[in-house]
Image (spheres, rainbow, N blue to C red):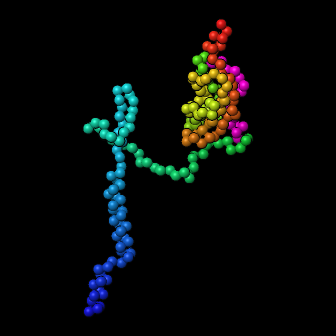
Amino acid sequence: MEAGIWLVETRMKPSPKLTMKLSIALLLMLCLVVAPLGAQEIYKVVDADGNVTYTDEKPTDNATPMDLPEISVVGEDVEEPPLAVAETDLEREALGFRITSPEHGQDVLAMDNTLTVNMASNITLPEAARIVVFINEEAQPPVSSLQATFEDLDTGEHTLRAELQTATGRVLGSTDPVSFRLHSIVREQRAER
């Protein structure tokens, strides 16, 4: 009789390996069922003025969601594609990224307190590169050409520098800082009267 009880007990208790396999299978099936529930639909809305808005709320009953590419997550350890980066002083000199105007120590007469900054480089800038100009160490919106105009600057002493960056913000080169004094043409003419 004891042998019969032992057989019944062993058949009723699954092995630990089987329990683990069943648990993993159930977990995978649960993930497959729940994963699509987390995906959100995105809608593109263009108003009468041509302004574009993206939203996860359905704007109209007949709106259809956008087809978006699958998101790929890139870890921090993935390197950017190589660009010509000035690694040594010799390479920085070869890049030759510099501010040509205003010049260091220059008095700049500006109409309506507008400043035009001209820069130069010994190389043709890559299309993906951007230039960030810093006025008094405050970053201005990036530009993609070697000339940038800034409006409504205060008169007086200013410092200026620029960085050549990749689209992701990695600095490829930077200019030496330039100090200049900005004078308003309108104020100069009033002072002469």
Q: Is residue 109 within the magenta segment?
A: yes
**Which quadrant, please, contains the C terminus?**
top right
- Where residue 143 appears, x then y in whole percent? 56, 31
Residue 129 drawn above or below residue 49: below
Residue 121 visible to an observer of this rendering: no
Observer-nearest of 6 and 121: 6
Residue positioned 72% across, 37% down in the render:
93
Residue positioned 34% across, 58% down in the render:
32
Q: Give the farthest residue toward the top.
A: 193
Residue 27 visible to an observer of this rendering: yes
Which quadrant of the view contains residue 2? bottom left
**Which quadrant, please, contains the N terminus?**
bottom left
Observer-nearest of 180 and 166: 180
Which quadrant of the view contains residue 34? bottom left
Q: Is residue 151 left or right of residue 176?
A: left
- Give the residues in magenta: 91-110
- Where residue 65 appears, x then y in whole percent? 33, 41
Q: Is residue 54 left or right of residue 101?
A: left
Q: Is residue 54 within the magenta segment?
A: no
